[in-house]
Amino acid sequence: MKTKFVYVLLVVALMLALTPVASAAPNGATTCDQDYTVTAGDWLSKLSDKFLGNVKAYFAIMAQTNYKNAEDSSYAKVTNPDVLEVGQKLCIPSKADAEAFLAKFDPNKGNIDLLFAKPAAGQLLVGNWWTSGGEFAGINGVYELYKKAHPGVEVVHGGIAGGGGVNFKAANLTKLQGGDPFDVFMLHAGAEVEQYDPAKYLTPVEAIVEKTQGSVMPEDLKKLLTYEGHIYTVPMNIHRGNVLWVNKKVLADNGLKTPTTWDEFFTVAEALKGKGIVPLSHGGANGFEAAQTFEVVLMSYAGADGMAGLTGGTKSWSSPEVTQALETYKKVLTYTNADRNALSWDQATKLVIEGKAAMNIMGDWANGEFKVAGKTDADYEGVPAPGNKGMFMLVSDGFAMPLQAPNKANAEAWLEMIATKEAQETFNINKGSICSRTDCDYSAFDTYLKSSAADFKVSRVLPTITHGSAIVPSWQAAYYDIIKLFEANGDVAAAQAALVQAAKDAGAATP
Ligand code: GAL
């Protein structure tokens, strides 16, 4: 079955112009036990069963074929194990070679560098979790730019699926601790860096940040970057986390207007529910969806100063605004899809794209999904979530470089590139974010992104709790668990008591 290929790890087509002088395969000389030409109806697990007696050995065929391709381009380059083309020439390893390969290779641990040849100019292993349609479209544009600027380097997309980094972060930490890191990996601006023990594992990058975008970076972002005297992430965007996504047709067909307050939201939601339409799609499979949606609701009650107080330890989580937010969130949940825990954030977005739900609250990476689906202003809009006007939840993506990055020069070139205006304009137009620099040209960006760029300038900017900017990882993890449990049991008092305790445990000196 093709579905056997649905692994945690998504390996995607990312090959640079091949250098004929590529060195030997990572696992030694490339010898094929036999060649095979793909015919209609072939897929890799079927072939691995046929030639190696093991349906699960398909990654060995993929790797061996890729190594061979680096020496002889008549062999195929297999960048996605799900995709074979008729006529491609494959290099089938011997059973012993396949077993030796599989003993070393574990896609769940992210050692996908083994699937590709290591050309003389080396690889660039890019660790991230950008595997949804819009996310990959964003990063792939930057890969293309990098490939042009650095022909001969093999760019490997180390995309470990799971929105918000739910699977990536633990795998990345294990790789860092094991001395087998990516060359660069996705890291949010702010407190998230703490979980990677930066003094021990990461390269300070303040010189690169200063040189490349220091003079054009918005202050709200800049002040988030320094951790214990150093900067460890080079930002490449600014996402807005507090957005309501609306299927315009669903609302218009029902004579309804986009809500701007929770009261309006409940009126609209009730009308839709009465007609059997899901008012608000909601995910849960990636763990962060509940945390983020509650954060948005909390912002509407606590306001910008209140949020700063809650995360900064000057306002107690026992405050009435937190109670109100929990109560409202509980009510919001009654207007969501019953299968929410089974859906990832992008599957929830898809319900809105397809008109199966009217609205969704999500960061503006959702904009990338609408774009990939070919949707335009006529179909959807992204506006501040109810009660969130004037506030901008900042989620900034960037990359860090491990001290033990195997391809340091390539990694440094990547960090320099992602900071540029050109790379950021290329990335953000598809990713659904704005630049981490103030000099980008938004004329080619869509209506939503133009509005985000304009709002960013005039809003109070609040670093995200959910995506690890405003609070330390241990507190963030406790916050996730509390809101997830709250979604299941709806116990306002218990959730609030746990939020108070979590702040206390994190050392937030609440009054
Ligand atoms: C966030 C990240 C975004 C987006 C989202 C969903 O943490 O900042 O870039 O990828 O997760 O996966």
Image (cartoon, rainbow, N blue to C red):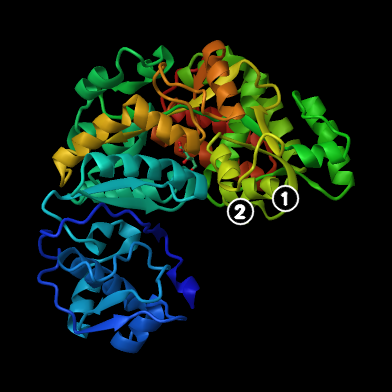
User: Can you give x and y, in whole percent of width and height, for residue 176 in the image?
Assistant: 23, 46
User: Can you give x and y, in whole percent of width and height, for residue 312 in the image?
Assistant: 46, 17
Q: Name the element at disc 1.
A: loop
Q: Up-down: is 327 above or below 172?
A: above
User: Can you give x and y, in whole percent of width and height, for residue 86 in the image?
Assistant: 40, 76
Which residue does the image show at 42% across and 21% down from the upper left? 440
How many residues crowd mark 1 within 10 Å: few (<14), some (14–19), many (20+)? Answer: many
Q: Which residue is mark 1?
A: 337
Q: Name the element at disc 2.
A: loop
Amino acid type, callout 1: Asn
Q: Which mark is on residue 343? A: 2
Q: Is residue 228 visible?
A: no
Q: Quadrant of residue 300?
A: top right
| CB atoms of marks 1 and 2 within 8 Å | yes
Q: Quadrant of residue 322?
A: top right
How many residues crowd mark 2 within 10 Å: few (<14), some (14–19), many (20+)? Answer: some
Q: Earlier in the sequence, mark 1 or mark 2?
A: 1
